[in-house]
Protein backbone atom coordinates (compact mmCIF):
# COMPACT_ATOMS: atom_id res chain seq x y z
CA UNK A 1 0.00 0.00 0.00
CA UNK A 2 1.31 3.44 -0.92
CA UNK A 3 0.83 5.99 1.84
CA UNK A 4 -0.11 9.50 0.76
CA UNK A 5 1.84 12.27 2.47
CA UNK A 6 -1.30 13.22 4.43
CA UNK A 7 -1.22 9.74 6.00
CA UNK A 8 2.55 9.81 6.60
CA UNK A 9 2.26 13.11 8.47
CA UNK A 10 -0.60 11.81 10.62
CA UNK A 11 1.44 8.72 11.53
CA UNK A 12 4.45 10.84 12.49
CA UNK A 13 2.36 13.40 14.41
CA UNK A 14 0.40 11.06 16.66
CA UNK A 15 1.38 8.62 19.35
CA UNK A 16 0.64 4.95 18.71
CA UNK A 17 -2.28 4.93 21.15
CA UNK A 18 -4.13 7.83 19.47
CA UNK A 19 -7.35 7.25 17.55
CA UNK A 20 -5.78 8.74 14.40
CA UNK A 21 -2.84 6.34 14.51
CA UNK A 22 -5.13 3.36 15.20
CA UNK A 23 -7.41 4.28 12.26
CA UNK A 24 -4.44 4.27 9.90
CA UNK A 25 -2.97 1.13 11.45
CA UNK A 26 -6.26 -0.77 10.94
CA UNK A 27 -6.27 0.13 7.24
CA UNK A 28 -2.62 -0.77 6.74
CA UNK A 29 -2.69 -4.06 8.64
CA UNK A 30 0.30 -6.18 7.67
CA UNK A 31 0.68 -4.78 4.16
CA UNK A 32 4.04 -3.84 2.72
CA UNK A 33 4.28 -0.05 2.62
CA UNK A 34 5.47 2.28 -0.12
CA UNK A 35 6.03 5.99 -0.66
CA UNK A 36 6.99 7.84 -3.82
CA UNK A 37 10.39 9.57 -3.81
CA UNK A 38 8.81 13.03 -4.32
CA UNK A 39 7.04 12.59 -0.99
CA UNK A 40 10.39 12.99 0.75
CA UNK A 41 10.29 16.61 -0.45
CA UNK A 42 6.67 17.03 0.68
CA UNK A 43 7.52 15.65 4.11
CA UNK A 44 10.62 17.82 4.31
CA UNK A 45 8.56 20.90 3.42
CA UNK A 46 6.05 20.07 6.16
CA UNK A 47 8.88 19.57 8.67
CA UNK A 48 10.45 22.96 7.87
CA UNK A 49 7.06 24.68 8.15
CA UNK A 50 6.35 23.02 11.52
CA UNK A 51 9.85 23.23 13.03
CA UNK A 52 10.24 19.45 13.10
CA UNK A 53 13.65 17.77 12.58
CA UNK A 54 13.73 17.05 8.85
CA UNK A 55 16.42 14.39 8.58
CA UNK A 56 14.99 12.47 11.56
CA UNK A 57 11.50 12.29 10.02
CA UNK A 58 12.82 11.37 6.57
CA UNK A 59 14.89 8.55 8.07
CA UNK A 60 11.83 7.31 10.01
CA UNK A 61 9.86 7.23 6.78
CA UNK A 62 12.61 5.37 4.93
CA UNK A 63 12.57 2.68 7.65
CA UNK A 64 8.78 2.44 7.44
CA UNK A 65 8.30 2.20 3.67
CA UNK A 66 9.89 1.22 0.37
CA UNK A 67 10.74 4.21 -1.83
CA UNK A 68 9.41 4.15 -5.41
CA UNK A 69 11.74 6.11 -7.73
CA UNK A 70 10.55 8.57 -10.36
CA UNK A 71 10.77 7.24 -13.90
CA UNK A 72 9.49 8.16 -17.33
CA UNK A 73 6.45 5.85 -17.15
CA UNK A 74 5.31 7.41 -13.86
CA UNK A 75 5.81 10.90 -15.33
CA UNK A 76 3.69 10.16 -18.39
CA UNK A 77 1.00 8.19 -16.56
CA UNK A 78 0.84 10.74 -13.74
CA UNK A 79 0.19 13.53 -16.24
CA UNK A 80 -2.56 11.49 -17.90
CA UNK A 81 -4.20 10.74 -14.53
CA UNK A 82 -4.07 14.41 -13.49
CA UNK A 83 -5.81 15.54 -16.67
CA UNK A 84 -8.40 12.75 -16.44
CA UNK A 85 -9.25 13.64 -12.81
CA UNK A 86 -9.56 17.33 -13.63
CA UNK A 87 -11.96 16.53 -16.48
CA UNK A 88 -14.06 14.64 -13.92
CA UNK A 89 -14.35 17.80 -11.81
CA UNK A 90 -11.52 17.33 -9.33
CA UNK A 91 -10.09 20.81 -10.04
CA UNK A 92 -7.46 20.74 -7.28
CA UNK A 93 -6.05 17.34 -8.31
CA UNK A 94 -2.40 18.17 -8.96
CA UNK A 95 0.43 16.69 -10.94
CA UNK A 96 2.06 15.24 -7.80
CA UNK A 97 -1.28 13.57 -7.00
CA UNK A 98 -1.17 12.00 -10.45
CA UNK A 99 2.40 10.86 -9.84
CA UNK A 100 1.40 9.25 -6.53
CA UNK A 101 -1.41 7.26 -8.08
CA UNK A 102 0.77 6.28 -11.05
CA UNK A 103 3.54 5.20 -8.64
CA UNK A 104 1.12 3.07 -6.61
CA UNK A 105 -0.21 1.43 -9.76
CA UNK A 106 3.33 0.84 -11.06
CA UNK A 107 3.92 -1.59 -8.18
CA UNK A 108 0.36 -2.98 -8.09
CA UNK A 109 -0.59 -1.24 -4.84
CA UNK A 110 -3.50 0.81 -3.53
CA UNK A 111 -3.17 4.37 -2.25
CA UNK A 112 -4.19 5.28 1.32
CA UNK A 113 -5.04 8.97 1.73
CA UNK A 114 -7.10 11.60 3.52
CA UNK A 115 -7.34 13.60 0.26
CA UNK A 116 -10.89 13.65 -1.15
CA UNK A 117 -9.51 14.37 -4.64
CA UNK A 118 -8.83 10.62 -4.88
CA UNK A 119 -12.51 9.73 -4.30
CA UNK A 120 -14.11 7.34 -6.80
CA UNK A 121 -10.80 5.68 -7.74
CA UNK A 122 -11.18 1.96 -7.01
CA UNK A 123 -7.55 1.54 -5.97
CA UNK A 124 -7.64 4.45 -3.50
CA UNK A 125 -8.77 4.20 0.12
CA UNK A 126 -9.89 7.64 1.30
CA UNK A 127 -9.94 7.94 5.08
CA UNK A 128 -12.58 10.10 6.82
Image (cartoon, helix red, strand yellow):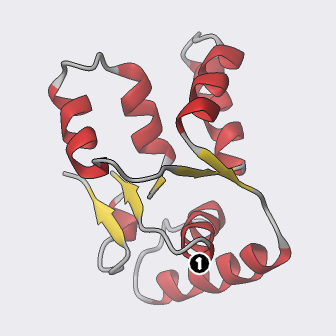
In the picture as drawn, the residue positioned furthest to the right comes out as 72
How far across and down, in percent of the image, does residue 93 sit? Answer: 51, 68
Disc 1: CA contacts within 10 A as few (<14), some (14-19) or many (>=20): many
Is residue 38 shown left or right of residue 105? Answer: right
Give coordinates of residue 59: x percent, y percent. Answer: 66, 24
Kind of element beneath mark 1: helix
What percent of the width, then of the height, locates residue 75?
Answer: 77, 74
The residue at the point 62 percent across, 47 percent down is: 66
The quadrant the N terminus occupies is: bottom left
Q: Residue at x 25, y 51 (%)?
A: 27
In depth, the one of 123 and 30 nearer the eye is 30
Q: In the picture, residue 46 is in which quadrant? A: top right
Vertical relation: 13 (above or below) 90: above
Q: Is residue 45 above or below residue 14?
A: below
Closer to the camera in the image, 74 or 98: 74
Residue nearest the viewer, comparing 44 with 56 = 56
Q: Residue at x 67, y 18 (%)?
A: 54
Picture coordinates of residue 72, whole percent (x, y): 84, 76
Q: Is residue 125 above or below residue 6?
A: below
In the visual, does 8 lie left or right of 104?
left
Q: How many marks?
A: 1
Q: What residue did someone put label 1 on?
A: 82
Which picture quadrant has residue 53? top right
Amino acid sequence: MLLDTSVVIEVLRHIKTSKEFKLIQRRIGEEELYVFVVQLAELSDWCFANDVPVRERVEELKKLANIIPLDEDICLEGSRIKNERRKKGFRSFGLVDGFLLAAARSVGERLLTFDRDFAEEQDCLVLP
